[in-house]
Image (cartoon, coloured by chain):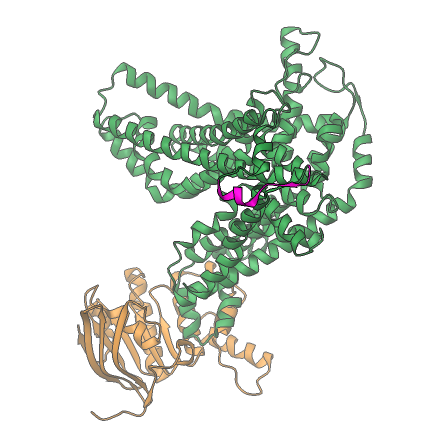
Chain colours: A green, B orange
Amino acid sequence: MSWSTRLLFLVLGAPPLVGSVLALAPAFSQYNLSDGSLNDSLNYFAGQIPPAFIALVSTPGIATSAMTSLLAGLLTPALSLVSVFLFLAASQEGRTGKMIAQLAAPVLAIPHAAAAFALALLLAPTGIASRIIASVAGWELPPDFLFINHPNSVALILGLALKEAPFVLLVALAALPSTDAPRRVALARTLGYRPTTAWLLTVAPALYPLIRLPLFAVIVFASSTVDVALILGPSLPPTLSVRLVEWFVAPEIEQRQLASAAALLQLFISLFALSIWLIFERLTARAYASIAARGAPRAASTDLRFEAVLTAIGNTLIPTSLVLVLMGIMALFLASVGAQWRYPAILPTAWSLQHWSTALSTWQTPLFNAIAIALLSVTAAIVLSLITLEAQTRSRANTTRLSTFLYLPLLIPQVVFVSGIAVFAERTRLSPSLLLVAGGHFFFVMPYVYLTLQSGYARLDSRWLLLAKTLGASSAVCFLRVRIPLISTQLITAAMLGLTISLSLYLPTQILGAGRVPTITTEAIALVSSGSRGTIGTWALLQSALPTLCFMLALLAPRLIWSNRKGML
Amino acid sequence: MTTMTTGLELQNVSLSVGSRQLLSLSCSVAPGEVMTVMGASGTGKSTLLAFIAGFLGDAFTAEGRVLLAGKELNAVPAEKRRIGLLFQDALLFPHLSVAANLKFGLVRKVGESPRERDLRIELALDAIGLAGFGDRDPASLSGGQQSRVALMRLLLSEPKAILLDEPFSNLDMQLREEIRTFTFDTLRAADVPAFLVTHDLADAQAAGGKIIAL
């Protein structure tokens, strides 16, 4: 192992592992903190169950909470994957498909919480969707049906999928060129398969392995999300992750032990979701093999109908999700400027900027904190990524294995890892501060920054640096005057991606800042129980503004900087 | 074998991948001469250039010595060898202007002011028929113009020897003739030893030096 690999492991691999151990350890304590008694330590080895586990198992509704998390962890990636693959199969990289994919990209910049709020305002009983139906169906009163926060978790899974599907789509589009898709489809079509079926049978199996790791990250994220579950998830009882955080931040120390036991359960649930996913992978592979063994269709009517149904679904799901997001943002906006908005009027009947002026009088500190944290964590991630990448190129090391532990902070549930860092900070007497929060953000920013810069390094023609050397350039000159300018587009993308992620992060900010480092994201989510529709709309839009700006900069900056250098674009 | 004092010399050079030997050769190139090494693809021509220039990949093992003006180069890093390389493509840095491309490798003279350096660049542009092109985006130049800038950039770095890696193979037929003549005339005038690898006999003949077939 080269020193750069070791450094990367130390920075990215070790903290999640150590953090998890620290988060889980209190669960095994034999001190019964609620009444101060101590279980006989000898009995521990005789198999006595630690009190925290007993407390967790006897917590009302814990099984339902765990089940909700498991369902979200499986259905979110499934829904995202199915909609993305059917979309790609149906659109066949056509012009409309490309346009829709471009529209999906900005959704990535919208923070999870803001998207969840948007969906909540859209689909609430008095939300825009209900008002539109009311105007058609002639309803006088809002429907007596609670979609948001319903125990069936449909809203939670829908809200997660709205954000994760664009992510899976962009990952898939990035990997698609290496599958040689058009030729595969052309070949299958000459053998008698219809286009959508041809894509699904020949391209999907080649594409899936390339997007597997990001999908695993989606599984872990969806099964352990806190902010989206707070906004859209069931409340009686909430998801496991939400309860874990409640216990973790509770003032009573015995709740800490309970949180720790819940963290262990959370880790188990996320891993269980991953295992079920792996089993489904096997089953799907088998189904594929048997379909392939049936041979080419003879344009039978069932095959044609099958093709038509798949194409129709593929053309519907992703565009519908985009429409939902767009309408949700409209709902946020209308709520933020509406003063009076009686049901079933589609638009507010009186307008006011009251919510905005109230928000703007308190937003400076949260905004400053958010920007400072984002800049600190992203700068650290870029510097460290460049150091390791530079060292790897110079030593010409084989780095394919690196990507596995790059994903480690993303493959361990955020709640487990973050509460572990918080315990570590307490033990080492690091008090909650902006710097500590930035340190926590670093772990979630780094994987994306590194992978983006790595693609920049990989894509750069190695002759540029050879050429610079034969012209007498030192290593420093090669790096500063050749490497950096030539990967500037990826550098900007990495920075903006990192900023977007950091600006949207809720859990590390809330837990590591212990409520003392408010950002726009934590302030927005704090409104979930107390906020009015108007304040929620305002803060959700405020929270989305900066990441959206970053996203636009990532697209525009290279064009502006290199406007007079066509070879750079 | 007598050691030359001015040219580029390869002594018992042998290159191999694993246990398979790619080539072995000894030769010397005098200043102002363009020696050609010819061979089909896969014979190790580019590997030989990488070895001489100083960036041979880990996969290869090399024996023998490279001497430049009588000094052994084997342990000298690429950027200190003063061996220039002309690639198949012009490879003008896309982020730099034409003038900045020329300046990239320009050897600074003691006591030279920035103004004097700019003047040298202007003269160099003039010499390749591109006077006034300094501020241009390299992407806006024609293929032939780019080739000439690439050659001038190489010469301004004042190399002690020049390697050419099939430098004309990506040019179309008409341009090829013109750039080839321009390049070889310029190289002979520059009076440095040059080493050309190609699979095109016309290139070898135009170079006018010794020809080694691999």
Q: Nearer the viewer, residue B92 or A150?
A: A150
Above or below, comparing residue B165 to residue A233 in the picture = below
Query: x and y percent of residue B195 in the render?
Result: 28, 77
User: Is any part of residue B128 visible from this angle?
Assistant: no
Report the quarter where the N terminus of chain A lies: bottom left
- Residue displayed at 67% across by 15% down: A131
Q: Nearer the viewer, residue A247 or B92?
A: A247
Count of numbered badges drawn on the protein? 0
Would you say residue A36 sits in the magenta stretch?
yes
Which corner quadrant of the image does residue A245 belong to?
top right
- Residue displayed at 68% across by 42% down: A510
Above or below, comparing residue B212 to residue A175 in the picture = below
Would you say residue A470 sits in the magenta stretch?
no
Above or below, comparing residue A394 to residue A128 in the picture = below
Query: x and y percent of residue B53 in the render?
Result: 34, 75
User: Is any part of residue A475 visible from this angle?
Assistant: yes
Does A377 sit left or right of B26 as displayed?
right
Query: x and y percent of residue B68 in the render?
Result: 33, 86
Query: x and y percent of residue A504 in the render?
Result: 63, 42
Above or below, comparing residue B71 to residue A525 in the picture = below
- Residue displayed at 60% across by 79% down: B115
Which corner quadrant of the image does residue A236 belong to?
top right
Q: Which residues, given as a range, are shown in magenta?
A: A35-46
